[in-house]
Amino acid sequence: MRRYGKHTDEDDIRSRPNRKGNRPRTHIRPKHEDAAEGLVLTVDRGRLTCLVEDRVVMAMKARELGRKAAVVGDRVALVGDLSGKKDTLARIVRIEERTSVLRRTADDDDPYERVVVANADQLAVVTALADPEPRPRLIDRCLVAAFDGGLTPLLVLTKSDLAPPDELLCLYGALDIPYVVTSREELENGAAADLVREHLDGKITAFVGHSGVGKTTLVNTLVPEDRRRVTGHVNAVTGRGRHTTTSALALPLSSAEGGWVVDTPGVRSFGLAHIDPSRVINAFPDLVPGTEGCPRACSHDEPDCALDAWVAEGHADPARLYSLRRLLSTRERKEGD
């Protein structure tokens, strides 16, 4: 039934008053073209510590971002109070496109994916050669996550005075992964940091490793106290005046080329439920042409896989195919195997 006649005007239309007295909701969001650029240094219970120019700014995620969360390493756009003064809070209104993502799940049955670090150039996997014993399956899993996320892996082997590195290096020789071997003495006197720093200058490097391998000791040596003052707010996150690796933390390197190291909490497991095995092959460019004859949805570890014939014809090193299949099958093996 028609409520109004043919010749209605504004006075004929009844408007419902806004009882709350606030502005009506709109789907049009501000573009925040004047927002400042920042780098997320750490995240703690909904509060994000960001570096804006030379200031450390505390911020929170704007509601308009919805479920999209910022993580350490994200480049973000901020508005609000950017002074960095005590008890001030800015808002993160935009998360820029990521160049790489290091992700993991709690275990291989957990569908919930956790982004550990964004925009890192490489992943330094720190492993002790003894005390505690090396865990090759955990290394394999970290490598798979690095290859899948677009990070270049780096092996850092510690405590070489307790056990030789040859056997472990032989296991990864076909992957052509750069590595650094250090002893406990070098770790303690700072010489290890000098060896590792050659691979870090000008890059953002995430460090992973389980407890006791010397990861945090190495990071502390790489980033001395005078550089940590740049992120003074971060060091007080725990309330104890210094960072104890309970969440990822980005710290600036003291070198002419610059760079950042991201210290991450010690890992007990590295789930790969989020990994699509078909993407791991991209880390083996010498094997990719051989997959053209593979059946659809080939796992590259089955009787009909064309890679067997490709390698047998001499197009690639058999050790490379073995390494690929070992990494692909790591989801079916426990990390302690």
Image: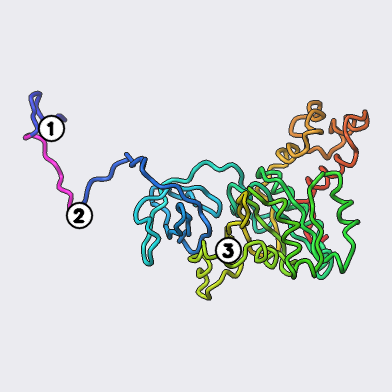
In this rendering, the answer to whether 269 lies above or below 146 is below
Disc 1 designates what residue?
3
Task: Rate crowding at label 3 as few (under 14), some (14 to 19) or many (20 or more) other CA atoms within 10 Å.
Answer: some
Residue at the location (39% across, 53% down)?
91
Residue at the location (82% across, 29% down)?
290
Disc 2 designates what residue?
20
Q: CA distance from mark 2 to mark 1?
A: 27 Å
On the question of residue 112 being in view, the answer is no
Q: Residue furthest bottom?
A: 240
- Residue 231, percent across and down? 51, 62
- Residue 34, percent across and down? 36, 43
Q: CA distance from mark 3 to mark 1?
A: 61 Å
| Label 2: element kind | loop
Helix, strand or loop: magenta stretch: loop
Q: Which mark sits nearer the N-terminus, 2 or 1?
A: 1
Q: Which mark sits nearer the N-terminus, 3 or 2?
A: 2
- Which stretch is magenta? 11-19
